[in-house]
Amino acid sequence: MRLAGELVLVVDDEPNIVELARLYLEKEGFRVAEARSGEEALRLFEELHPTLMVLDIMIPEPDGWEVCRRIRSRSTLPIIMLTAREDEVDKVVGLELGADDYLTKPFSPRELVARVKAVLRRTSLSGEPRDVLHVDDLVIDSSRRKVFQREREVELTPREFDLLYTLALNRGIVLSREKLLERVWGYDYYGDTRTVDVHIRHIRDKLGDNPQEPRYLETVWGVGYKFREGKR
């Protein structure tokens, strides 16, 4: 499983934050590049092809939300967003734009490293035997981390893939939001259950799945979600 040696692009206009992140990430064997503005972040994204981006919201020209939006429109690069406030709106907007995780400043650099490792573990190819799920008209390939709908590839973020795969693997079983947070985000994830709802909405949009008449993902009100049982 790949972890050490991966390139992490840290985007923040506060030098002390960047240096602290660099110190702890390099200590764990990661390579680190840095950007101080949105424009520089987008340029380095194109030039360096990082494995993961740590992205502050309040950066200049353009801000972190716009950087996330532009990257997510063309790439599934894992993104951990940083926010200086405990503002729920910031977190929800970041998730809506496709961020995989977020941290609130001030944060523990050890927690940042742990989050980076967790995201990369979820997005890496482990070399395990190929496992392909065929559910209705979907093909979910866990080793290549690809989803096809009637032979059309569906572009999912790493977290969206993990969520869809977990539900499909437990087809017909209702999984609570808390259980999905535990299985997909990890037992030490500190987010709230609405994080799951945001990602479910993204998956439905990409699959063309109407929540009022779901073909794939069914909401079980007051509990969680399940992948519907239907024709195989």
Image (tube, helix red, strand yellow):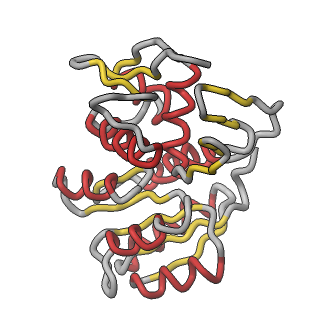
- Residue 93: % across, % down: 26, 57
- Residue 120: % across, % down: 61, 49
Q: Is residue 9 above or below residue 15?
A: above
Which image quadrant is residue 45 in? bottom right
Residue 187 vs residue 85: left or right? right
Q: Say how many tags the image has.
A: 0
Quadrant location, the N terminus: top right
Which image quadrant is residue 145 in? top right
Closer to the camera in the image, 132 or 47: 132
Closer to the camera in the image, 195 or 221: 221
Residue 162 vs residue 210: left or right? right
Residue at the (31%, 40%) spot, across then down? 195
Q: Is residue 71 above or below residue 173?
A: below
Quadrant location, the C terminus: top right
Residue at the (49%, 81%) spot, across then down? 42
- Residue 38: % across, % down: 40, 82
Q: Residue furthest top?
A: 173
Residue at the (60%, 33%) spot, across then down? 137
Residue at the (46%, 53%) spot, across then down? 112
Residue 187 vs residue 6: left or right? left
Q: Is residue 64 above or below residue 147?
A: below
- Residue 167: % across, % down: 50, 25
Closer to the camera in the image, 101 or 176: 176
Residue 150 vs residue 131: left or right? left
